[in-house]
Image: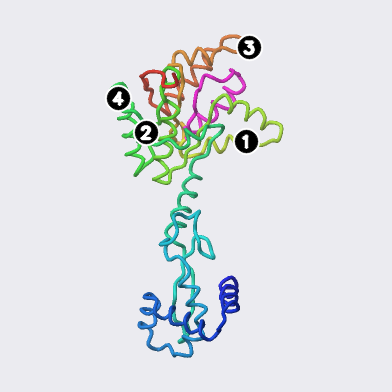
């Protein structure tokens, strides 16, 4: 209220004839189509009340109503950003209140929606990926059909299997994960996308501040877990058996899906997971591969390296 009153007083102070300008302002306000309609709808308002409420009417007139003078939420011109004025009558007195405008509602929905995707070290390009950006060439048809099948089922019930996507460098595996995560936001399904080499470093660093269990619980329980570039991390028997195995075991038991991307098919990944400083541990690696099969469906994403 204060900025409007200050503006009005300053305008009056600059006037050579206060009365003349006051009457001019009053006439302009009362001839405003919205204000005329408001007064006509409330015959109980006395002339004295209308005269007393000129500052409120001036405030209403100079504010943008439901974004009609604002290009976006960020460019809102109103006193209270993202709020639109409404005139109302209570006890035969004029009052002004504010409600959220369309732009603010859309902005808040977008902000809330963005919270549904958390990530560890994923580039902005991936987090902003959309299904409409995915190349739909013949080599991708099988994979895309499975993706749309998953998304369609997720509208009513979360499937218990994600996808294990393997293929050459730059074929678009990670980008597809980002697009799937953004599509799932529409159904209020949360996703956590993790770049595996950084994930290993994050878990090791968490040992120092005793936050490792909290982080593992997050990865266990998120609606959709996406592990990007599995097999690219430096292999650690401890991480494989105590962290990765624990997460996959929990999600397998709870019927929670996991998405993976890798440059390895499952047989190649098993070889990678089996190789440790202590030697080759085929059985322990096989257990991880078995769990991957329980929480995802294996698909080969074909195509050329789009990074070239």
Q: Position of residue 226 (x, y in %)?
A: 47, 31
Q: Position of residue 275 (x, y in %)?
A: 56, 12
- At mark 2, the secondary structure is helix
Assess disc 3: are there few (<14), some (14-19) or many (≥20) residues with their C-alpha within 10 Å of its C-alpha: few
Residue that label 4 marks: 137
Figure quadrant of residue 298 = top left
Residue that label 1 marks: 213
Residue situated in front as seen by the camera: 233 or 242: 233
Q: Earlier in the sequence, mark 4 or mark 3?
A: 4
- Residue positioned 39% across, 40% down in the render: 183
Residue that label 2 marks: 133
In 3D space, how far apart are the residues under numbered discs 4 and 1 (Cα atoms)? 42 Å
In 3D space, how far apart are the residues under numbered discs 4 and 3 (Cα atoms)? 43 Å
Residue that label 3 marks: 277
Q: Position of residue 118 (x, y in %)?
A: 52, 39
Q: Earlier in the sequence, mark 4 or mark 1?
A: 4
Image height check: is 58 above or below 265? below
- At mark 4, the secondary structure is loop
Q: Which residues are magenta?
A: 225-251
Quadrant where the image shows the N terminus: bottom right
- At mark 3, the secondary structure is loop
């Amino acid at each position: 209220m204060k900025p409007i009153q200050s503006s009005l007083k300053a305008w009056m102070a600059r006037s050579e004839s206060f009365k003349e300008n006051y009457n001019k302002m009053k006439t302009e306000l009362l001839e405003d189509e919205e204000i005329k309609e408001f007064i006509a709808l409330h015959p109980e308002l006395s002339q004295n009340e209308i005269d007393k409420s000129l500052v409120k009417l001036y405030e209403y007139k100079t504010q943008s109503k439901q974004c009609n003078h604002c290009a976006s939420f960020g460019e809102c011109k109103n006193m209270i950003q993202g709020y639109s004025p409404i005139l109302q009558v209570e006890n035969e007195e004029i009052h002004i209140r504010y409600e959220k405008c369309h732009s603010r509602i859309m902005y808040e929905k977008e902000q809330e929606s963005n919270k549904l995707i958390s990530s560890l070290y994923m580039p902005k390009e991936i987090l902003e990926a959309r299904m409409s950006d995915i190349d739909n060439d013949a080599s991708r048809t099988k994979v895309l059909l499975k993706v749309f099948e998953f998304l369609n089922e997720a509208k009513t019930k979360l499937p218990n299997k994600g996808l294990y996507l393997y293929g050459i460098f730059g074929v678009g595996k990670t980008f597809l994960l980002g697009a799937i995560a953004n599509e799932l936001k529409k159904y209020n399904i949360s996703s956590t996308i993790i770049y595996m080499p950084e994930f290993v470093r994050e878990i090791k660093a968490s040992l120092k501040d005793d936050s490792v269990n909290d982080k593992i619980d997050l990865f266990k329980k998120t609606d959709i877990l996406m592990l990007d570039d599995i097999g690219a991390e430096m292999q650690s028997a401890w991480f494989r058996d105590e962290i990765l195995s624990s997460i996959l075991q929990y999600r397998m038991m709870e019927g929670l899906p996991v998405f993976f991307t890798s440059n390895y098919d499952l047989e190649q990944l098993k070889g990678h997971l089996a190789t440790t400083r202590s030697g080759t541990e085929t059985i322990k690696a096989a257990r991880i591969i078995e769990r991957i099969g329980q929480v995802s469906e294996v698909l080969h994403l074909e195509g050329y390296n789009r990074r070239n």
